[in-house]
Image (tube, rainbow, N blue to C red):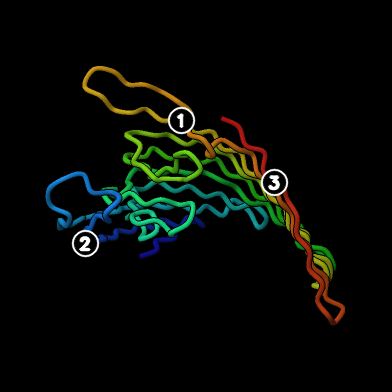
Amino acid sequence: MVTQTLRLAVIPSLRLETAKDTLTSPARYRLSGVDTQPATYWLPNARLALVQWASEQVTLRANLGRYGRLPSLTERYGNTGLLLGTPNLVPESGTNADVGANWTRQGERLRLSLDGALFAVWARNLIHFLMAGPYWRPENVGLARILGAETSATVDWRRRFRFFGQTTFTDAATRKTSAEVMASSFLFGHACAPTHGRSCATFPWRVAGAGGCTPTWT
């Protein structure tokens, strides 16, 4: 449902995800007792989005909602390579929010678009990969928060040349729950500033190129 008044769109949504699994632990994960157990999950996700057309060139937007994500088969059981599975993973859930703006200028030959956004995620049982010797293994993180900003620019010239550039900054930390303490630490691989660009030209043939870099710190 979309309600639009005075160039403002209000978009609510509600989604319910349900899953029923039978979890089987491979021999190398078995500790003792039963190797197979049933698991049923219910993930209600509600979201509210706002879009404001401030002018012919400027659009403002905001989103707030809940999300949920089931573990994948690869996360549960690995890929028989360097990725080990964790059969007892539970679904990841949390709240995310973002605000952003877009400015677009359309000329006779040139179209320029600039976009920027701030976002935040507060997650419970975040599925995060950790190194286990030479291997990687996913685990559930108790509580985590991820903050970030993203900017992008697009240039179109006479529908024959297009350039797109984007950069994203994220900062993530986790708090592992305990009855006595809440210990904070950084999430390896979630604090980074990837930058990439892509361009293409049509003459009538098409030529495309892409490049980027992703510095990461902990």
Identify the residue shown where x is 56% and y is 37%: 170
For the C terminus, give its image quadrant.
top right
Task: Name the residue rendered at 65%, 50% in the picture.
Answer: 115
Q: Amino acid at mark 1?
A: Ala
Question: Residue 149: percent from the left, percent from the top?
Answer: 59, 39
In the displayed structure, would residue 21 be above or below residue 169? below
Relative to 15, say whether 29 is above or below.
Answer: above
Crowd class of label 1 (few under 14; some 14 to 19; many from 20; radius 10 Å):
some
**Crowd tier of the residue under label 2, counting other residues whose Cα lies within 10 Å: few below 14, some 14–19, many 20 or above:** few
Q: Would you place residue 113 above or below residue 215 in this image?
A: below
Farthest front residue?
A: 27
Q: Which residue is denoted by mark 3 in the rendering? A: 195
Callout 2 amino acid: Asp
Q: Secondary structure at mark 1?
A: strand
Relative to residue 83, is residue 85 drawn left or right?
A: left
Among the 4 quarters of the image, the one containing residue 125:
top left
Q: Nearer the viewer, mark 2 or mark 3?
A: 2
Is label 2 in a helix, a strand or a loop?
Answer: strand
Q: Position of residue 86 (x, y in %)?
A: 33, 49
Residue positioned most to the left: 33
Disc assigned to residue 173: 1
Q: Nearer the viewer, mark 2 or mark 1?
A: 2
**Among the two numbered marks 3 and 1 on one chain, the one whose residue lies closer to the N terminus:** 1
Residues under labels 3 and 1: Cα distance? 21 Å
* 203 left or right, relative to 134: right
- Residue at the (59%, 53%) spot, across then down: 59
Kindly tell me whether residue 135 is visible in this rendering: yes
Query: Which amino acid lies under the numbered mark 3 shown in the image of this protein?
Result: Thr
> What is the distance, in whole Å, between disc 2 and disc 3 at their CAs?
39 Å
For residue 21, the mark is 2
